Amino acid sequence: MTASGAMPHPWIEAILRCPDCSSGLIAQPRGWRCSVCSWASQDPRDLQPQTPRELTLTHRRQAPAAPDQLLEALPTEPPPLTYAGPTALRDSSAFLSEMKQRLQPGATVLDLGCGPRDQQLPIESLGFRYLGVDVDSRAADLLVDAHCLPFQDQSFDAVLSYAVLEHLRDPFVALREITRVLRPGGLYLGTVSQGEPFHASYFHHTAWGLLALFSSQPELETLRLWAAIDTLESLARMGRYPKVIRKALAGLHRLQVDVPQLAPRKARWPRKALQIDALYRAGSIGFVARRG
């Protein structure tokens, strides 16, 4: 499987479906066509929708959950790090550790919003099959829209979306698609922006927001949330500020890390309270969920 215009590997070809009507695809000399509707592509990598389609989302009417109680019941620290293989441009050791623990050899992993496709080598080093998709990255195996994934139901054992949800115009629709393509017991892992500044993003998610989003899919169980990066550090790295302001923000971040005496009351807090406090201050939140 390459990003050079070649047809995908047979295991991938077997799970493809039309992004417009969900019917089967027929391989053409230079692309695909739908077996039912008028969708066709002259590029074997391009599997994006071509015809707007109305969708109906169903939300259960229920008593509002108490997100603070949900967070108290959830693990709110990063997963234990057991992965020691090849590294990626973007640190994914926490997610690779979860995959290593929970997935069987030969599992299929969808890297949704793969960007530079830097997760391929680490994921394949664990004996998993990798597919990297993106809406516009030249490095991607396939070009897809997260709101209408061109794959059959229950096609993957895991979906990784590293800093993706904030870039989607309708995360509820995208999450329904992610849940649909996961096999029972499959993992959904990734990060999402909370306190990071705007970066071609639509919806940044708080921990409460993630819990509400995941609860929209009854089959999806949240396993873990944690603070992946602090907001001050995010602003220092990504904020549209003059360099001197970014350096000052970085200094403030180091100050609050290195001098805990600035908040002496927190010295008496239990570990769980400190983890949740870090979540509330997070620039980015990591998560692991599982389809039941």
Image (cartoon, rainbow, N blue to C red):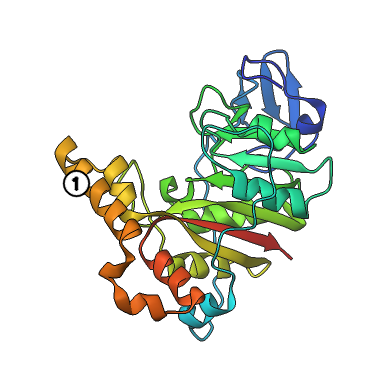
Q: Position of residue 236 (x, y in %)?
A: 27, 44
Q: Position of residue 88 (x, y in %)?
A: 57, 33
- Furthest toward the right, the residue is 105
Report the front residue among 92 and 46: 92
Report the front residue among 64 and 148: 64
Report the front residue among 202 and 54: 202
Residue 281 to residue 235: above or below:
below
Residue 223 to residue 136: above or below:
below
Left or right placement of residue 139 versus residue 263 in this view? right
* Residue type beneath disc 1: Ala
Left or right placement of residue 141 versus residue 53 in this view? right
Indicate the quadrant where residue 217 lies: bottom right
Residue 153 to residue 84: above or below:
below
Left or right placement of residue 228 versus residue 4 in this view? left
Element on which disc 1 rests: helix
Residue denoted by label 1: 248
Q: Position of residue 281 (x, y in %)?
A: 35, 63
Q: Residue at 55%, 23% (x, y): give it.
A: 139
Left or right placement of residue 135 versus residue 122 in this view? left
The quadrant of the rendering that contains the N terminus is: top right
Assess disc 1: are there few (<14), some (14-19) or many (≥20) residues with their C-alpha within 10 Å of its C-alpha: few
Report the front residue among 46 and 258: 258
Q: Residue at 49%, 70% (x, y): give it.
A: 212
Q: Position of residue 287 (x, y in %)?
A: 56, 58
